Amino acid sequence: MSVGVQFTGTLTANATQKWFTFNWPQQWHVEWNVVPTSPVPGAPQIEWDVEVERASPTAITYWIKIHNLTAVPVNIEARYAVMS
Amino acid sequence: MAYKKKSVEVAGTFKSNPFAVDFPKERELIVMTAAATGLRSKRDGLTSEAGVDVASLSDLLATEGVTLQPLFGVPEEHLRAEAASLPPSVNAPDLSIYYRVQAPDERLDELAAKLLTHDLVEAAYVKPAGEPPVVASSTLDLVEEINQMLPREDDAPPISPDFNVRQGYLDPAPAGIDARYAATQPGGRGANVNVIDCEWSWNFSHEDLMTNQGGVVVGAAGGDDNHGTAVQGEIGGDLNGFGIVGTAPDALFRAASFATMPTAAVIRQAANLLRPGDILLLEIHRPGPRATGAGQQGFIAIEWWPDDFDAIRYATSRGVIVIAAAGNGAENLDDPIYNVRPAGFPASWMNPFKRSNRDSGAILVGAGAPPPGTHGRDWGPDRSRLDFSNFGTSIDAQGWGREVCSTGYGDLQGGATRNVWYTDTFSGTSSASPIVVGTVACLQGILRNRGRIPLSPARVRDLLRSTGSSQQDAPGRPATQRIGNRPNLRQLISSALQTSTFAGVQFTGTLQANQSARWFTFNWPAHWHVVWTVVPATQKPGSPEIRWNIQVERATDAFITYWINVTNITTVPVTFEARYNVLGW
């Protein structure tokens, strides 16, 4: 198991943005997790989902779509966990 | 509390510093207006986005011949957008309500008093000039002199010697922080970490500060540059076989200057240049309510002032690690005097040194004694509080407050050009704070090298408080006068890299036919990588029963709240369980 941060970014108010990250070995089981880094208590700030592309026989590209649920900019970091 | 005057006795012949320049010192009149007013200060006058009548405030300003200038140098609507539409419970800093009034110094107090009488003004206070944490001599001879070193008269050799052995603060714990061990780890010299030092001036032409530096990126440098040069050397001194070596020489060192801009504006701009996990150093303190006028006695950390607090809060809320000198005022920051709201501060102000009130997120650094015998001198038991250092429960960690060998000043090696000057006696919370900065840069470098999640401000504070070499008693300065532990990188690296994996069921619930509902679960450590799964417990073979998604809230620096939306997509009630899997951190 290894965990880490793949990228950080900023979403403007109510924006939805898609990032991609490529050349992940196809045999890896990767879990993604996106969290805000700007504390704003009281309500959810973001939601996200992952789309997957088999770019080659050996590599996978992950497309990570993040939606800012608030009316202010939000800083985020996208974390991965390689399970096996 | 009075100091005993001491002097640092160093053999040699010294000369006056031909390059000495005073630090620019300017008091600042800060005005805060009611957020509900939606004030805008433009070239052609004041307006209110909320339709409030601002004519009387305009008249008052016109009568006095002054204007309100947005303190952060950014239009109010831009700053307001960051604070708008937040839930009422949010205590995020609204920087749009801060203004600065510029006028001759002798008028500032009178202007503050007049502005404070106006209904639209929530606060008007004159901030004393900030200074680097040095202790200047006083006519009363009560105050110890530090960082008043003079350069040696004798010329430097053609190639500077290797002074590394004199940098005991790099040594293994408990004497040092064990940066020598960190340097053996990939990334352990601060690689891929950015540091911005906020103070006045630096010598970026010094022979030992040529690599991994980006110059002044906010404001313009002004004043004597020895202080900033010594700070820079402690963090970023080049790894080159001569002179000194920094704690984190692979970190990118840049500078932001208070010489020409309001301090709060400098902090905000510098924070905007950093990523989460990068480091902002505040080498400044100001005279607090108990300042005596004798040197820097009674000087305290700047988060006590509302605009500086909110600027620091702005930085830490972006994930930037703010490390601040606690100040050389010899003050107990737990003293009740710091609970007393000064005239002119907003009614909502509370003592930030009592963190249960409110918390800037900064890491405050006190000054501890180096091991006795360092450079042949004795400042008391190792890791005991030095007499000038502020202390209290809000101080997070200590660094060497004496005998720090670094670049600048010239008392260790002088010469005709200050580009070869070195010091053996850099001191104060000034010298202590860069040691903690270097420590954190090494840690973040190691984590980044491994692709790990960089430490958040709250996590750095937690690790600094839970590891390290403990503070020692000194006669008259017991360890109960808290300045915290001296960092120990070997322990810190081990703690930061430690990880764990576990799973469980957080809650169960029932949804009626076609019902959607949302649950939240809070106080999850922000550095944990948590994966959620929701599965039905009600058996209904043949088609899907539920759909779910996760929304995420960063509730504080330290904790995350997960919001779990679950929809029953059947026509019968469904019971489910929400499972978590902590994959590490």
Image (spheres, coloured by chain):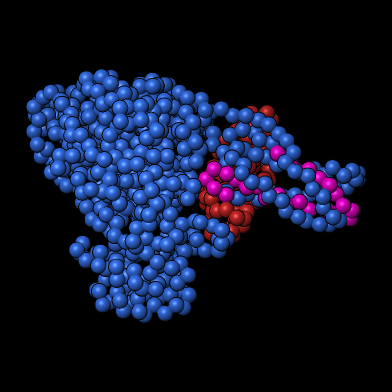
Chain colours: A red, B blue
User: Where, by quadrant of the figure, is residue B203 drawn?
Assistant: top left
Q: Where is residue B532 drawn, in percent x and y?
A: 70, 42
Q: Which residue is drawn at 29% across and 60% down?
A: B126
Look at the magenta stretch and give its main secondary structure.
strand
Q: Which residue is drawn at 56% across and 62% down?
A: B88
Question: In the picture, which quadrant includes the N terminus of chain A?
Answer: top right
Q: Residue at x 89, y 53 (%)?
A: B572
Q: Is residue B401 above or below residue B29?
A: above
**Which residue occupies the foreground of this view, B490 or B208?**
B490
Residue B569 part of the magenta-drawn span: yes
Relative to B422, is B524 on the left or the right?
Answer: right
Q: Where is residue B70 drawn, in percent x and y?
A: 36, 64
Q: What stretch is highlighted in magenta?
A: B555-580
- For the image, the number of numbered tags is 0
Q: Residue at x 36, y 24 (%)?
A: B176
Question: In the picture, which quadrant includes the C terminus of chain A?
Answer: top right
Residue A76 part of the magenta-drawn span: no
